[in-house]
Image: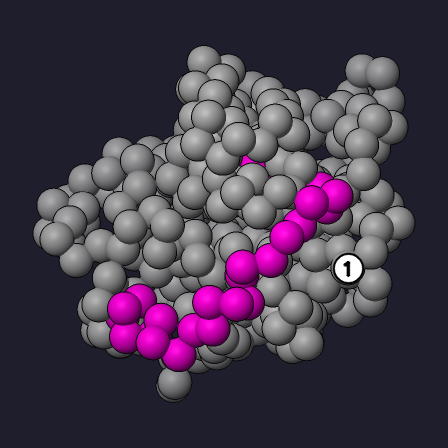
Amino acid sequence: MSWYRNAVWFVKGLREYTRGGYESASKRFDPADVEVDVAGRSFLVTGANSGIGKATAKEIARRGGTVHLVCRNKERAEVAKEEIVTETGNQNIFLHIVDISNPKEIWKFAEKFQNEHKLNVLINNAGCMVNNRELTEDGLEKNFATNTLGTYIMTTALVPLLEKAADARVITVSSGGMLVQKLNASDLQSGNGPFDGTMVYAQNKRQQVVMTEQWAKAYRNIHFSVMHPGWADTPAVRSSMPDFYERMKNSLRTEAQGADTVLWLALSAEATKLPSGLFFQDRQPVPTHLPLAYTHSPPEDEEKLMEMLEEFSQKFKSVSPGI
């Protein structure tokens, strides 16, 4: 049935995920939802030096929020920070250099951050699509390490800080590509069979949806959401999916359009009126499975995923220096 899922997803994408889909959906948006003053609230955005992460950080900064940029590349991050400060006039922009594919670094960062800052909203935006199987220095498959385990550790490590905050939220930037994947908790590092970077990425994004649903059940004082930004023209799309980019470049959303729902989920009072744990596209909750796609997983598989991620997480916490 994979051919069916792929075909339905692509047709759906052509209709909804492109710039035209955004322009159609935006006719029902209430601009007042995101035109709010968030001075005094603290936001952490991973992968904030380009693309949707930078667009989100910039718009939060315009509204007075304190923004923590978590980036891997120091040089590009400093350029992004300077741009955000210059364009918004907001001086409360802080930079943290962390490789989200390195679990020890995340633990070390989170411990330090909790001792020095407050946090109202965590935005898990950092991600990668590596098209050939590549291992990190810890022996982790790079896509899994960044998209799944990195997101898991960053979130769970900062939950204690978020639970102290008013109106705490966690937003994870996923992808509609997850609709073509059924959760596979038995091969988290994609070591069995041929390696297809696009499908591994889609599997990671399905894992993010499951994590969000599970977190929503476990942490009732935090509002969790996961979203699809649509098909946006970002540096990551250009570098990781060059063929797709060439075919679709005239129809792709802008970075700001891709970031719109992230911003809405992070700022809007309307967002938290909806239940925690939902999957969003263009400011509204949407199904996490295509019709007749057979991508639903039994609860025990979802529990197994969370148990395995916690085991990985604790393993790297125990060997982290200074923790």
Identified by mark 1, the residue type is: Asp
Q: Quick one: which residue is furthest to the bottom in this view?
A: 292
Residue at image point 52% right, 67% down = 32
Which of the two residues, 126 or 274, is positioned nearer the viewer here? 274
Residue 254 percent location from the top left of the image: 29, 50
Q: How many marks?
A: 1
Q: Is residue 307 magenta?
A: no
Q: In this view, does 52 lie above or below 225?
A: above
**Nearer to us in this view, 300 or 150:** 150
Which residue is located at x 58 percent, y 32 percent? 90
Q: Residue at x 22, y 54 (%)?
A: 252
Quadrant in which the C terminus is drawn: top right
Q: Nearer the viewer, residue 58 or 195?
A: 58
Kindly indicate the quadrant of the structure image that contains residue 216: bottom right
- Residue at figure coordinates x 47%, y 21% from the top left: 82
Asked whether residue 124 appears in the rendered view, the answer is: no
Give the side of residue 31 with respect to residue 226, left or right. left
The quarter in which the N terminus is drawn is bottom left
Where residue 319 sits in the image (x, y, percent)? Answer: 79, 22
Above or below, 126 relative to 4: above
Q: Position of residue 312 (x, y in %)?
A: 71, 39
Q: Is residue 313 left or right of residue 194?
A: right
Where is mark 1, residue-wise? 167
Query: In the image, is residue 215 above or below residue 161?
Result: below
Q: Give the range drawn in magenta.
A: 21-46
Q: Is mark 1 on a helix, strand or loop?
A: loop
Residue 30 falls within the magenta-colored stretch: yes
Relative side of 322 to 88, left or right: right
